[in-house]
Amino acid sequence: MKRATLPLILAVFFLLATGVFAAGEGPTGTQFHGLDPAVLIGVAVMLVIAKLMGELFERLHQPAVLGELFAGIVLGNLVVFGFTQAESLKTNETIAALAEFGVIILLFEVGLESDLKEMMEVGWSSLLVAVLGVIAPFLLGWAVSAYFIPDEHRLAHVFIGATLCATSVGITARVFKDLGKLGTREARIILGAAVIDDVLGLLILAVVAGAIRASATGVTLSMFDIALIAFKSLAFLIGSIVVGQLVAPRMLRGAGRFETRGVLLTLAISVCLVLAWAAAKAGLAPSVGAFAAGLILDEVHYKPKGGRQERDLHDLLQPVSTVLVPIFFVLMGLKVDLRLFTHVNILGLAAALTVAAIAGKQICALGVIERGVNRVAVGLGMIPRGEVGLIFAGIGATLMLPASNGENVPVISSAIFGAVVIMVIITTLITPITLKWSLGRKRTNKREG
């Protein structure tokens, strides 16, 4: 495909999508089993523009996830030009359910990509980097929120701090892979710390979400209640991993006797959904359970009957995530109202959150206790929030807190959500550039020496 063809395809598709949406105005047509046919064309449009924009961003040497997010932002803000047909997608329950399913699959993938053994092997540096990389952004984000939006509920400030905790391991890993440096000590420290960051971030999310749900019912949690939620979250993760390590091998050995195709993928997704359900029943976010399922089934292989070719679970899961995960990112983009950024205070909040997000991860580089390690590269490699930050923000948009007028309002309002999205975009964009510069600078200094 020539370079000039992609923008042309994008333009043509947007025109076609506009025509299809416009043709669907008025009566929505015959419904079957309660499903509005408009949802079908809506999901089709979301998937195609996600892939086209993802391709465009990858050609610009940027993560495809940013293209998917940008696709949603463009589609959601066509209302400025009088195109209102996409507005129903923002609040459609079916699309919201598909997006939540996508988040569960995404966290399952993150768990699969996380190696518990490597987390144990990288030593104290990764642990200290991870802990500092959670505490510093959390406190800075809380402080920024409290300063810029003092009228918001205290738990809203806490939640905004929590959105700054995580690190997108995928983006940093891709940069190291492109440079052929995945085996370096810096890469191992960053990737190990990023995984621990995800675990700590999910624990913080569980505690804060529990406090918010309690506050919505008029209950104030004591320190004991908060400690209990944290203990329950940690116990769930550890318990799931221990039990899973005992049960999963036996289950998969039994699955190898089946001749039906797709047994491994079906069982893996079933384990993911069961643990997501168990996490929800335990009062945690379902994503915690999905992440635990990925840790359990990491590096899973099974021996199929009859000598059929053995396939990796990552490869089997790819078609599922390819379809479901982009729906989540496009929906997140749809919820960004660019008209809000005409307000200086929102832009100020976005800028301050971005500075806090970057500064917090630079502080974590102080946790590197080994000599000869490029601490600047470690700090820069921990910057991107990517998909994990968007997941946190998306969860915040669904949690409710009591307002002064007695009504419940979202923890993350549309204006704050937009500011968080800007922070995610900027931290994700600058990481590949700054990390390549830092690693290249170290190489140049060695030559000069």
Image (tube, rainbow, N blue to C red):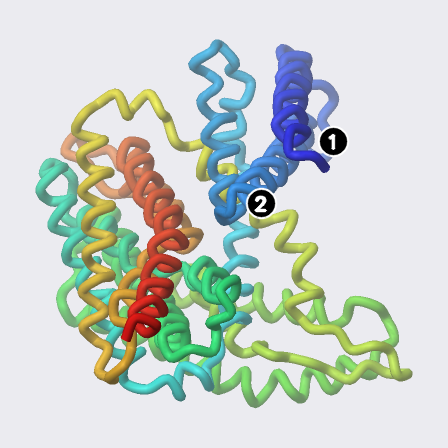
Residue at 78% x, 84% y: name it: 303
Residue at 26% x, 58% y: name it: 208
Q: Is residue 421 above or below residue 190?
A: above
Disc assigned to residue 55: none
Residue, disc 1? 32
Q: Secondary structure at mark 2?
A: helix
Residue 298: quarter of image: bottom right
Q: Nearer the viewer, mark 2 or mark 1?
A: 2
Is residue 130 visible to the viewer in this orientation of the structure? no
Q: Is residue 266 above or below residue 47?
A: below
Please indicate whether residue 62 sits to the left or right of residue 397 in the image.
right
Residue 448: quarter of image: bottom left
Give amino acid for label 1. Phe
Give the percent coordinates (x, y) of residue 94.
Answer: 58, 38
| Image quadrant containing the N terminus | top right
Please indicate whether residue 416 sits to the left or right of residue 384 in the image.
left
Residue at the farthest front position: 448
Which is nearer the N-term, disc 2 or disc 1?
1
Distance Cα–Cα, label 2 vs label 1: 18 Å
Q: Is residue 434 above or below residue 72?
A: below
Q: Secondary structure at mark 1?
A: loop
Q: Is residue 86 above or below residue 112?
A: above
Give amino acid for label 2. Leu
Residue at 24% x, 72% y: name it: 131
Give the percent coordinates (x, y) of residue 389.
Answer: 36, 52
Disc assigned to residue 98: 2
Is residue 115 visible to the viewer in this orientation of the structure? yes
Give the percent coordinates (x, y) of residue 449.
Answer: 28, 75
